[in-house]
Amino acid sequence: MKARRMIALALMACLAFGTLAAQQQQLGRVAVVDLQKVYMTYAKDSAPVRAFEEEKARVQAEVDRMTGEIKELQRRKAEAISADDKELIATIDAEIGRKAVNLSEYYKIKRAELDEKAKKLSDSSEFAALAAAAIKKVAELEGYSLVVSAQQMDGTGTAVLWYSPTVDISEKVIFELVGKAK
């Protein structure tokens, strides 16, 4: 009698485990795609993308120049500290503070402008249709039931807090798009 009861309990446990496993298999797989990365890679030879990349390079050069000025002031401040010139130290500190605020504001404004330009570039209707088809094909082939964007719709940053690189299908979407373009 005890043996039958043990077998029945073991059988029920196996059935419960099998049901749980089947339910877990029904949960969909999720993928992530970075549409800006896809667009910039796919359309890197287009004139608007080249202009965007040139603008990014100009902004970075200006940030580097402004950072260099601050570093030079910091070097001069260290010399003034060595010479114990309190008046010069105060003057340089004020200048460093002003330049740091200017750099921060410049970077914030230019970053927002560049993000907006990138969003406009990647929002073109032709690209959107091609990307949607490529994402659908890759997702279906790879068995994903949901694909989320790595960027928020307004381009202000990531909508996804964390994801494993193994679920990023951006490169596969690029490959699909490039294959269709040839």
Image (cartoon, rainbow, N blue to C red):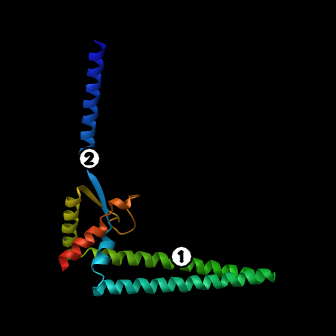
Q: Residue 38: give x, y in percent of width and height.
A: 30, 72
Relative to residue 1, is residue 68 drawn left or right? right
Q: Nearer the viewer, residue 171 or 53?
A: 171
* Horizontal arrangement in the rendering, residue 81 relative to residue 70 (left or right): right
Query: Which residue is the extreme one toward the right?
Result: 84
Q: Residue at x 24, y 40 (%)?
A: 22
Picture disc at residue 46: none
Rendering coords of residue 65 (x, y %):
55, 86
Q: Secondary structure at mark 1?
A: helix
Q: Residue furthest front?
A: 3
Residue 120 can be seen in this image: no
Describe residue 43's horizontal placement relative to residue 65 as left or right. Answer: left
Whether residues under marks 1 and 2 lie with C-beta atoms below 8 angstroms apart, the answer is no
Tag 1: residue type?
Ser
Q: CA distance from mark 1 to mark 2?
A: 45 Å
Quadrant location of the N terminus in the rendered image: top left
Labels in figure, total: 2
Specify the amino acid type for callout 2.
Leu
Checking the image for residue 27, the label placed there is 2
Question: Where in the figure is residue 49, as x and y percent of width and height?
Answer: 32, 83
Q: Which quarter of the image is occupied by the C terminus?
A: bottom left
Near-viewer residue (111 or 130):
130
Choose the circle earlier in sequence order: 1 or 2: 2
Question: Quick check: 8 above or below 182?
Answer: above
87, 132: nearer the viewer: 132
User: Crowdedness of circle 1 by 10 Å Cα count: few (<14), some, many (20+)?
Assistant: few
Quadrant of the rendered image containing residue 18 = top left
Residue shown at the point (73%, 80%) measured from the top left: 78
Specify few, some or many for label 2: CA neighbours under 10 Å numbering under 14, 14-19, or 20 or more: few
Instruction: Answer with the quarter of the image where residue 94 lies.
Output: bottom right
* Mark 1, residue position: 104
User: Residue visible at 30% across and 82% down?
Assistant: 44
